[in-house]
Amino acid sequence: MSGIPVLHVESDCIARGWEESLVELNRKGCDIRTEYDKPGDPPSKDSTMILTIADPLKEPMIHKDFPGGPLELQEYVMEVCDGIKDHLIRNQKDPEDTRWEYTYHQRLFAYEAPGAELCDQIETMCRKLAEVPYTRRAQAITWKVWEDNDCFDPACLQSLWCRIIEDSGRWVLNMNARFRSNDAYKAAFMNIFALVQLQKTMAERISQISGKSIGVGRYCHMADSYHIYGSYFREFEGRFLGALEKRTFEQRTLHYEAVREMMEEAKPAILEKARNMGR
């Protein structure tokens, strides 16, 4: 192939899919520089990735080698699904405000465009799918062309697209998530896990609106640039690739059900921590 490799990974669960995507990226990705490189940093390993997870709620859901733990994962899920850090978004009219450019929750649940009312894109998607399950128009976007082309830190997640089909006698919600840029080692696992939680929440909301039982179908994670930064490739080789040789898949992963109660119990403390951020 001439150009950036397009890699395809299909797996049964989140933990295995993320692991296999990194192995494939390491084997077949190309070397390319980034805008964040410091002098002396080696080039990143990069590709376009299409990762399909057939049953995103299947255990084991958690991989032990993502850079974080169950509590950090719970915090990120609450950031994406509940908006616990939306107050950290900067005032666009204040050039002195150096807080965040966006959160995914704000862009998905309260998308703001000049001259228009705030749009809850997720609720709109759910209502569209409850009315017409096979619609191709149920999507949410994050990109703001009037802002993001010039801001320092534009949104990586670009869009979500969902559709419902009947599969083996039950209705299931399928989700596609497209990223323009995705840090494969240090961000992708948490991105995938949180978006699958959003997929589950959407299936429950559509069930509520439609009166039909909607399950969670396959999840497809698409990244234009799926990369491992050269600056932490030594860490990746030692921590992630080293574990592949020393431990079994069962030893490298964790069942969500085994830590769900602990993660749920941590919610009040995580919420309080988020409220105190930016003060």
Image (spheres, helix red, strand yellow):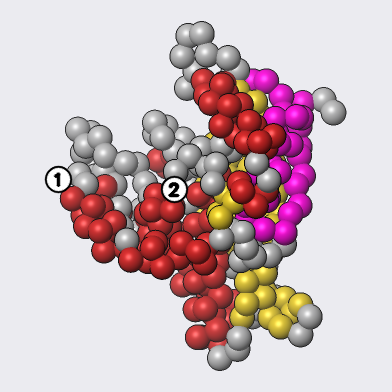
Q: Can residue 87 be seen in this snapshot?
A: no
> Which residue is at a point 21% across and 37% down the rendered structure image?
97
Secondary structure at badge 2 equals loop
- Residue 167 position, x and y percent, is 76, 77
Q: How far apart are the two marked residues, 1 and 2, measured between alpha carbons?
A: 26 Å
- Residue 147 position, x and y percent, is 40, 40
- Is residue 39 highlighted in magenta? no
Amino acid identity at mark 1: Arg
Secondary structure at badge 1 equals loop
Q: Looking at the rendered structure, which numbered label has been put on residue 60?
A: none
Stretch in magenta: 3-32
Residue sticking out furthest to the top: 40
Q: Looking at the rendered structure, which numbered label has been put on residue 279?
A: 1
- Residue 31 position, x and y percent, is 67, 20
Q: Single out the mark in the foreground, 1 or 2.
A: 2
Number of marks in picture: 2
Q: Can residue 95 be seen in this snapshot?
A: yes
Amino acid identity at mark 2: Gly
Seen from the viewer's position, the closer of residues 252 and 188 is: 252
